[in-house]
Amino acid sequence: MGTAAAALASKVFAAEGAGILSGPEIPFSFDKLIADAKALSEKPFEKAQVKDRDTLERLDFDEHQQIRFRSDSAIWVKGDGPYPIELFHPGKWFKEPVRIFVVNGTSAREVKYSSDLFSYGTSEFAKTLPPDTGFAGFRVMTAPGVPDWLAFLGASYFRSPAETGQYGLSARGLAIDTALNRPEEFPRFTQFWLEKPADGRKGVIVNALLDSPSITGAYRFDVEHPGRTVMDVRAHLFPRADIERVGIAPLTSMYWYGKPNRKVAVDWRPEIHDSDGLSIWSGGNERIWRPLNNPRSIQTSSFYDTNPKGFGLLQRERNYSQYEDDGAFYNKRPDVWVEPQGDWGEGAVQLVEIPTDDEIHDNIVAYWTPKEPFRRGQHREVRYKLYWSLEEPFPSPLAKVVATRVGAGGIPGRPRPRGLVKYVVDFEGGKLSELRRRGDIDVVITVPTGRVEREAVYPVVDSERWRVMFDYTAASETPVDIRVYLKKGNDALSETWLFQHLASLATL
């Protein structure tokens, strides 16, 4: 394309939106994006150039909130696409530019930054940013002026509110060296190529280029939104260097306090968390529920497996009365479930729990880390699905854990022995409703060290639940995994409750 033609094309208002300025037409395919990611991995990493850093530094949370994308300029706002897409303005926390392209068949055009695409409120000073500033990310709207259902913003983070419109935990493209004795590396999506599903489905295809000092990647998110949000994810990864710990399909959430550790709360609300447990469906078909902790120091737990069927961070407590929050609506926060596609081989689901004293900090991370390390010069392909919803997409026929409580052990009215902790675990569902008498069900409690006493299992009055209660004394201050499940004869009736006992629980 000649200089004059390119200049003309860049000034044409694209059909996708009333005010979107498009660059010249360039070829695009996902195969080309894979080739671009591979070529990029063979070059030294270059940090993104930030335009007018001082102005962006002034756009803190409050100032950034003043800036709004003009909805009449959205991509596909005229109905020529499945959903309108609005763009995020850069700011203090999102300085590094992201390039946005709109795909049409085998070609694409870049959306150029312009202050005319935004209203600035009291942040008019930001209108002086240069025309090559770039964007921070994008969000997919349900309809013009109607709340969004998908957003990509910051590093390689993205999230969806599922059916209720209430955002909660986030996912990431990749995690690098999480919870090691050095700073974590955060790969970043630097380019997005937005595409309509060819078959007319109600969804969007997001192609993304990932870049960081240690790795590059080409991602394709085929996203549907029929109520819940389902993402079919394909990733082609090209390490620039040997990587000690790679986190595939990482999920990031917040757990401050709930039933097990309610006494650490300084807030008036009964519980505050985006997720309350990690659920695992192992390759050996075991269902595991691991309640989340807010530990006093960083804890990393590894659940070794081969070809897991799935895992996810879930919010099982759905009763509003357990939160009493009519602003954050923690009872409506979505679950996210990871369903591996193809052969994931040996590895581990890792759970990282970080101390927090407020709800504004994400302190929970879960991901799959493969046994075979990533080496420089490799090409690794990974496929999986993400389900964002209020219910688990593959519910177990077994009873599930619905509540975990922790308190002082011993017998009321008698001295409470130091270090004795009482655990109370409620199960519901499966065949439990058919069994209503003490003695119908057995409980299996397994601990590697320490002592269990006063164990009991019984139906909870006026409910469909069964309750397990026992006292535990640890043998040392080392964290201990306690396993509990219900059975009748040789048949398991429930998933496995797997709780990490910490010494701090004995002082609650």
Image (cartoon, rainbow, N blue to C red):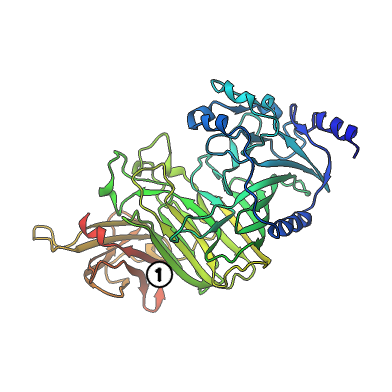
- Position of 369 relative to 148 (above/below): below
Instruction: Give the image location of residue 370, x and y in percent.
Output: 55, 69
Outermost residue toward the bottom in this view = 490
Residue assigned mark 1 = 493
> Which residue is drawn at the image coordinates 29% and 58% (left, top)?
460
Between 47 and 380, the one lying in front of the other is 47
Tag count = 1
> Which residue is drawn at the image coordinates 43% and 53% (left, top)?
364
Instruction: Give the image location of residue 74, x and y in percent.
Output: 69, 32
Do we see residue 408 in this rendering? Answer: yes
Q: Secondary structure at mark 1?
A: loop
Between 271 and 108, the one lying in front of the other is 108
Query: Would residue 364 be found to the left or right of residue 271 on screen?
Result: right
Q: Quadrant of residue 129?
A: top right
Do we see residue 399 in this rendering? Answer: no
Q: Quadrant of residue 72?
A: top right
